[in-house]
């Protein structure tokens, strides 16, 4: 499959490298065509990896991953272009963490809205699936580094899109039984508002290699 | 121990009954001295249970539990009276769920503040410990109804107060290893912002008998 990876940070690079390793072709998108981080990543990752603008990448991919900061996601997707997103599965792994007021970061959108919902509203022809935003990049693509089983949430309005993303998550190593569909894209609000707790957990354990496992009784 | 239980709802009644069962004396506080729910609970629960105003209860208790809705907590504690809270452990189990705009509820405070922090700021002589707000009332007092072990968060600025609350949680049935101290009262923000996810989990599984277990890797 051809994948557009929007974002050149740790999350974009980790997901891009893992997807290439699984046999996919990945084009990393950045603001400028000559972005050094994207070019260096593509050169280091092999023949199935390439780099371009956000629009180049989005036009190339059959599936689009938003690995940008949630605070700039809408600007990035505007640059990618609605026509390049229409009809495609758009995997949104972003979080609206705002460090401009110091630490702990606040969320630039929450409570009455979320990045996932904003993206789906602005690009109604994209098939947005929110997932992976609740774990760090290493755990995203190698869930077994946190032993004992743990839960990956996903949500979105399009059942077929969610089924496709489930398959992708399974190839990353997520057992099917640990994938939890929380429903429509409105659940993105819940998934993003979990981030402050996740940051506290990171602080408490001194590692981002953690996650939660949902336990259910009668 | 003498406990003030502020709030006459399901959470207050469940916690009050459990504490009486464990040998404590509990006075349930309500807005009016003759509150029917509080009186009925006290009559049904036995000689160690009594009812009164918020101030009556707070004056009575060596330890105070805030089991009111987070949206009215500050008003309730004002009525309880600062002098009746000073120096005491104040266990805040509330959530600021606001149903006035429909469902899902929003939080009346979040992101830059929390009920736990508001309470500690307004009553600096109280020793606030936030805990139990992330599970439903049944799970609070009988954690074993969710099998497999799962995590109870707590936070607060006073280490001795947290140690006292840990003991109370252990008597409810929480294994010491499942109690997770997230640090100062600022973590109340993270614990309260988890609520939207908890509500989605309830929706996904059709039961409130659930919780998350924190899993940690290397």
Image: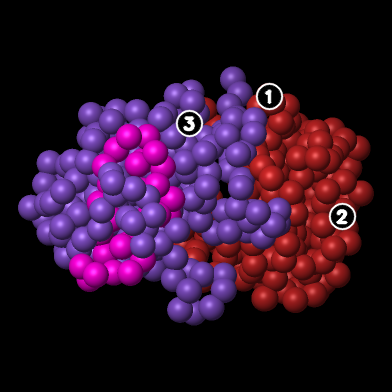
Chain colours: A purple, B red
Picture residue at 62% right of the left edge, 39% below the top = A146
Q: Is residue A74 above or below residue B86?
A: above
- Disc 1 versus disc 3: nearer the observer: 3
- Disc 3 versus disc 2: nearer the observer: 3
Picture residue at 66% right of the left edge, 27% below the top = B146
Gap in Å between the C-alphas at discs 2 and 1?
25 Å
Q: Nearer the viewer, residue B14 or A184?
A: A184
Picture residue at 44% right of the left edge, 71% below the top = A98
Q: Which residue is mark 3?
A: A173
Residue A144, percent across and down?
Answer: 58, 34
Q: Secondary structure at mark 2?
A: helix
Residue B157 figure quarter: bottom right
Span colored in magenta: A11-39
Picture residue at 52% right of the left edge, 51% below the top = A136
* A16 in the magenta segment: yes
Q: Is residue A214 above or below residue B12?
A: above
Q: Are marks 1 and 3 in contact (CB under 8 Å)?
A: no
Q: Is residue B155 left or right of residue A145?
A: right
Q: Residue furthest top?
A: A218
- The answer for which chain carries disc 2 is B
Gap in Å between the C-alphas at discs 3 and 2?
40 Å
- The answer for which chain carries disc 3 is A
Q: Secondary structure at mark 3?
A: loop
Residue B192, percent across and down?
Answer: 56, 55
Q: Which residue is mark 1?
A: B147
Q: Nearer the viewer, residue B201 or A46?
A: A46
């Amino acid at each position: 499959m051809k994948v557009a990876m929007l974002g050149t940070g740790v999350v974009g690079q980790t997901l891009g490298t893992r997807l290439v390793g699984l046999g996919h072709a990945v084009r990393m998108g950045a603001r400028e065509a000559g972005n050094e981080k994207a070019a260096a990543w593509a050169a280091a990752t092999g023949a199935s990896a390439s780099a371009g603008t956000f629009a180049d990448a989005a036009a190339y991919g059959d599936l689009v991953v938003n690995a940008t900061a949630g605070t700039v996601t809408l600007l990035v997707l505007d640059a990618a272009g609605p026509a390049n997103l229409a009809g495609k599965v758009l995997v949104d792994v972003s979080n609206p963490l705002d460090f401009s007021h110091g630490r702990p970061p606040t969320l630039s959108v929450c409570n009455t809205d979320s990045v996932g919902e904003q993206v789906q509203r602005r690009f109604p022809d994209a098939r947005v699936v929110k997932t992976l935003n609740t774990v760090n990049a290493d755990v995203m693509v190698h869930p077994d580094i946190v032993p004992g089983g743990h839960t990956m949430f996903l949500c979105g309005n399009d059942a077929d899109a969610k089924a496709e993303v489930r398959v992708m998550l399974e190839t990353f190593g997520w057992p099917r039984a640990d994938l939890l569909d929380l429903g429509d894209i409105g659940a993105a609000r819940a998934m993003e508002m979990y981030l402050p707790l996740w940051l506290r957990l990171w602080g408490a354990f001194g590692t981002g290699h953690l996650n939660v496992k949902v336990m259910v009784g009668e």
